[in-house]
Structures are given as C-alpha cells and as structure tokens.
Amino acid sequence: METLGIDIGGTKIAGGICDEKGNIRCLQRVPTPEDAADINAVVAGIYQRCKNDGDIRSIGISAAGNVASDRRTVSFAANLPAWNQYPLADAIENLIGDGVKVVVENDANAAGWGEYRFGAGRGSRDMIMITVGTGVGGAVIVNGQLARGGFGMAGEIGHMVMVPDGEACGCGLLGCAEQYASGSALERFAWSAARRQPCQSEHLLEACEYDRSKLIGPMVRDAARQGDPTANEAFDRIGEWLGRLMANLASVLDPDTFVIGGGVAEVGGMLLDPARAAFSRYLEASMYRQHASILEAKAGGMAGVIGAADLARID
Ligand SMILES: [Zn+2]
C-alpha cells in the first residue's frame, strides 16, 4: 500500500508518495505558511497533485510540535503558535475528503522511524535516534515499536536534566542535555575557549570577525579542520556530553543501536569518536556487557517524510 508522507517543519513543508521500500516520488517542497488553515491548504494541494500518481489511502504527517497520544492533535508547537491544541488530523481530513485517513506524528519520532526502517537503524530491534542540531531531539524504538509514551511525549531526550542548576534551556528548565550536546553548545564552548586562548583559535576568530553574535556551528567545524585546537576541543566536549547521555539512556533502555543525526552529526568522527569513547567510559558495567553500535544517520533530510508515511501505513 502506498501512503503520502508530509513533513511540516518550521520553514518548509516537504511531501511525496512513499512505497514500502522507502522510495519517494511526486516529491514537493513548499515554504511553511504561518496560518494553520494555510498549512492545511498546502497539505491538501500536495495530495491533489499526487493523487493520480498512486492509490493513496492515508497520509502520515510529521509535525514540528508535541503530538497528543491520539496521533491527531498537536498539543504544543514552539515554532508554530497557530498549532497549540490544534486538531490537525481532523482539519486535514475534512478539507481533503475522499475517505483519506490522516495520522500525525512528532517530527523527531517520524525521522527516527525513517532511520529505523530505511536508514542506519535497519536490522536493529531496539534503537535510539538522537538528533544533534541547534537543539537535541530523539526517538525511541523498543522491540520494533515506536515508543510514544502514555501521553505522546516519549523521546524528548534533549530535556533530560544532566546538570542540576546548569545552563538555562528554552523549555524553562535548567541544565538540559540540549544545552551541552547540541550545536548551540558547540558554539558556546568554542567561543569561551577562543576568548581564553585566542592564539589557539585563529581560524575561528577570523571567521566570526571576533564577534560572538556572528559565530555559527559550521565555522567551528571549519576551524577544527584547519587545525584550531580549541575548535577540536569544543567537538570533544559536546561529544563527551553526548556519550554521557547515551550511557544514561542505555541504563534504562539498553538499545542495540544508537543513530546520531542532525546537522552537527554530519562531521562524522569529529563528534562520534569522542561520543563513543565517553559512552564506554560512563556505561554501567562497561566491561561486562555488549556495547550498542553508535552509527551516523543516513536516511537524510527525507527521513521525516518516509517515516511518517510508513507509520501511517502500519497502523
Ligand atoms: Zn530543556
């Protein structure tokens, strides 16, 4: 059975028809409008353009927000205020008609499911996806099932408190993992090191013109590749926190595989090597157990589309 997968992000909406092997066709990309009704119209438009290209019975939506356990309602969306307590599935089903069923999933969960089925997690049974971008997102698969939790909120790995009274997080808590193992933490660590050791940070300081507000993650990556010791240390530091986070997760869920995705993870070993080392160091009974594989994501930017489409197919 073919389904339509649609990923509604803060800046763009991508969607297409997905088959059972994770192939996409009729792929379309549209900027995300601000208004909820306009977003629904974009989704309906993608359906209209694709419907003659396949036998679409259901639509899986990957939504950048918290999704209630009914898999129909967005309870809160930090980047799309129009979606607070919004019945997204009802609204789209009513607009499209044709008896098409709509299933809504949280975006990190949909992308994690895409990795599990068609990407780096293929063949695993218990997998945790960690997305390292500006923030830290996650998805948890237990015994081949996506863990949604009792209230739809499972997998919010980035908001596990790692440091009591630590850095303030956008969620309102202090010391969340997201403040230590993310792209924004990378920038913060790199800047503080550059301030202390400017002679070890020449490439980075030149790239950002000695201005903290101009410093972005890719500059830290480039400076590390050009040999700035402090830029390399910044990757070591977020890698260390990522390893610690994975060791904590392993104590609860003991996954066979971790998949690390998101923009920051595209540097590969620069992040994953220190993360693997720290994981082994912090893992309970490290010498007496099997260690999970820690792999780089490979389903790419379409993981949310194919993951949402697949989740709509199997339920
Ligand atoms: Zn937080």
Image (spheres, rainbow, N blue to C red):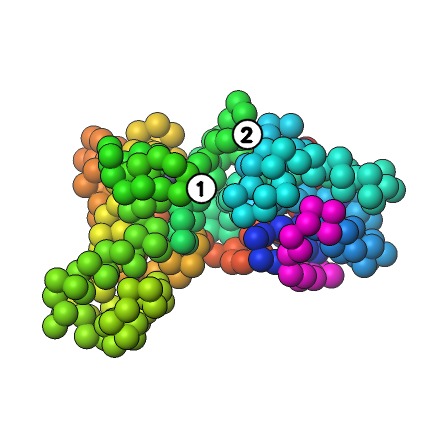
Using residue 90 as the reference point, say whether residue 184 is left or right of it.
left
Who is closer to the viewer here, 84 or 240? 84
Who is closer to the viewer here, 277 or 261? 261
Q: Residue at x 60, y 37 (%)?
A: 84
- Which percent across, then down, holds residue 47? 78, 52
The range drawn in magenta is 23-38
- Which amino acid type is marked by label 2? Gly
Tell me the element at label 2: loop
Q: Residue at x 41, y 54 (%)?
A: 133
Numbered badge on residue 152: 2
Q: Quadrant of residue 205?
A: bottom left
Who is closer to the viewer here, 265 or 167? 167
Q: Quadrant of residue 196?
A: bottom left
Query: Of label 2 and label 1, which has the lower sequence position?
Result: 1
Specify whether residue 291 is in view. Answer: no
Numbered badge on residue 267: none
**Looking at the figure, which quarter contains the N terminus?**
top right
Establish if 133 lies above or below 66: below
Q: Residue at x 25, y 39 (%)?
A: 166
Name the residue that disc number 1 marks: 138
Q: Is residue 86 on the magenta stretch?
A: no
- Which amino acid type is marked by label 1? Gly
Circle 2 crowding by C-alpha within 10 Å: few under 14, some 14–19, many from 20:
some
Q: Residue at x 22, y 52 (%)?
A: 237
Q: Between marks 2 and 1, how big is the CA–CA gap?
A: 13 Å
